[in-house]
Image: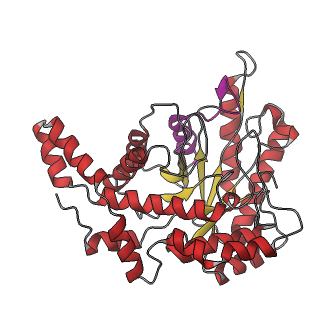
């Protein structure tokens, strides 16, 4: 196999885009303690500015996802203009029905019609934000579930979820999409209303063509073969988005590729095989919290990790792999796979970045830029943006 990245590979990498989350720049993190840091944004406008710095140094992060109500502003047209002036756009709008007291026993699945109405209306307001920002995707993650057997009627909740989603889906217009995330547990511990890709697939399939599944890489039980799920959803035409992050135990929201770089490679190798790379129907996004590390460097490292594993996946010798698979050469097939994974593409990527007018080492360039020192000094006083605000 060739271990050299070719002009064709670089042309593919040049198209890659990874959407970054606004909340990664605020104070967010674990369930135990959220630590504050100097220079933390005080409003969505400053979050966008920090995200734009990531894109300026990497060329990989041209869009910023919003979270409502964490990113509420009076004028979304002004926020959109602010982003565009900084060279980025506003991307996915994420809904939030897991903080209000009313949602203690569910939101879109709640047995009380008034609470369901509140949750539906929140999603309709999120679509209003999409209209103002030019966003395409409404991403829904639900904390809905139960803790004890007999606590709820699980089938009834699935029926109510479908009814609620139908109304939200009907409000979408043009190219707008609904992407439904899943998570196998937490904060509900007995059952979760959308616990797996199959449930998400069943729900969105009943909605229509513009309803898709969102796969968060941290939302699976230990040992889950995530690349199999990637394959299946691509095969079914229902993989709408990734939320990239890493986990060691539960949903840790750590830097993508930090816990298991080989898993990230396997996932992206399957994305490439299935036609999901640089496919406008499959959005790449980070969903991470930086609680103890610096936030902007954390995002820079994250998008570079995705780029590096994509480059390695592009080096996979598909012809040799197919021949080994067809002949039953188990070890030969595995060797082809591992050769690509073990190839160090970092020097070639650094040289390529320089050829595009980007820093060879974006992490070092950020450290030397003085940006962190400047925002540390400028953003003194006022309330820092944080999880839940």
Look at 65% across and 61% down and name the residue there. Answer: 295
Could you say where residue 27 lies in the image, as x and y percent from the top left? 75, 55
The reply to whether residue 156 is visible in this rendering is yes
> Residue 180: within the magenta?
no
Residue 345, located in which quarter of the rendered image? bottom left
Could you say where residue 311 lies in the image, as x and y percent from the top left? 34, 62
Could you say where residue 104 lies in the image, as x and y percent from the top left? 82, 34
Of all residues, the one furthest to the left in this rendering is 327
Where 234 sits versus 56, above or below?
above
Colouring of the image: secondary structure
The reply to whether residue 92 is visible in this rendering is no
Identify the magenta region: 186-207
> Residue 206: within the magenta?
yes
**For residue 342, side relative to residue 264 (left or right):** left
Of all residues, the one furthest to the top in this rendering is 150
Look at 30% across and 69% down and name the residue there. Answer: 9
Q: How many marks?
A: 0
- Quarter of the image with the C terminus in it: bottom right
Where 116 sits versus 123, above or below?
above
**For residue 85, side relative to residue 72 (left or right):** left
Could you say where residue 112 lies in the image, as x and y percent from the top left? 84, 33
Q: Nearer the viewer, residue 312 or 239?
A: 312
- Quarter of the image with the N terminus in it: bottom left
Q: Nearer the viewer, residue 186 or 348?
A: 348
């Amino acid at each position: 196999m060739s271990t050299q990245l070719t002009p064709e590979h670089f042309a593919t990498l040049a198209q890659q885009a990874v959407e970054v989350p606004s909340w990664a720049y605020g104070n967010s993190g674990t369930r135990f303690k959220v630590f504050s840091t100097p220079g933390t944004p005080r409003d969505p406008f400053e979050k966008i500015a920090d995200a734009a710095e990531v894109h300026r140094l990497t060329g990989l992060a041209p869009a910023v996802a919003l979270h409502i109500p964490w990113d509420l502003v009076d004028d979304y047209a002004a926020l959109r203009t602010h982003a565009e002036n900084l060279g980025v756009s506003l991307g996915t709008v994420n809904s939030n029905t897991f903080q209000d007291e009313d949602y203690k026993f569910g939101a879109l699945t709640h047995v009380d019609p008034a609470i369901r109405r509140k949750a539906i209306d929140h999603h309709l307001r999120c679509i209003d934000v999409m209209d103002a920002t030019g966003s395409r995707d409404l991403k829904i993650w639900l904390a809905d579930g139960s803790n004890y057997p007999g606590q709820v009627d699980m089938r009834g909740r699935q029926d109510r979820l479908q009814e609620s989603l139908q109304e939200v889906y009907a409000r979408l217009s043009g190219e707008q999409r609904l992407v439904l995330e899943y998570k196998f547990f937490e904060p509900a511990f007995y059952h979760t209303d959308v616990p797996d890709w199959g449930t998400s697939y069943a729900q969105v399939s009943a909605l229509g063509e513009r309803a898709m599944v969102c796969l968060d890489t941290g939302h699976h039980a230990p040992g889950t073969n995530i690349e199999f799920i990637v394959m299946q959803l691509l095969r079914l035409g229902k993989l709408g988005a990734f939320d990239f992050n890493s986990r060691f135990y539960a949903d840790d929201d750590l830097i993508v590729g930090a816990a298991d770089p080989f898993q990230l490679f396997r996932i992206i190798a399957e994305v490439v095989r299935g036609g999901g790379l640089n496919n406008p129907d499959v959005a790449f996004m980070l969903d991470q919290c930086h609680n103890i590390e610096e936030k902007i460097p954390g995002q820079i490292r994250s998008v570079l990790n995705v780029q590096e594993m994509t480059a390695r996946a592009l080096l996979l010798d598909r012809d040799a792999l197919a021949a080994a698979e067809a002949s039953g050469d188990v070890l030969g097939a595995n060797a082809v796979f591992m050769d690509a994974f073990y190839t160090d593409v970092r020097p070639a990527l650094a040289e390529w970045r320089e050829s595009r007018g980007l820093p060879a080492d974006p992490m070092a360039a950020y450290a030397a830029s003085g940006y962190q020192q400047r925002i540390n000094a400028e953003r003194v006083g006022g309330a820092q943006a944080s999880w839940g605000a």
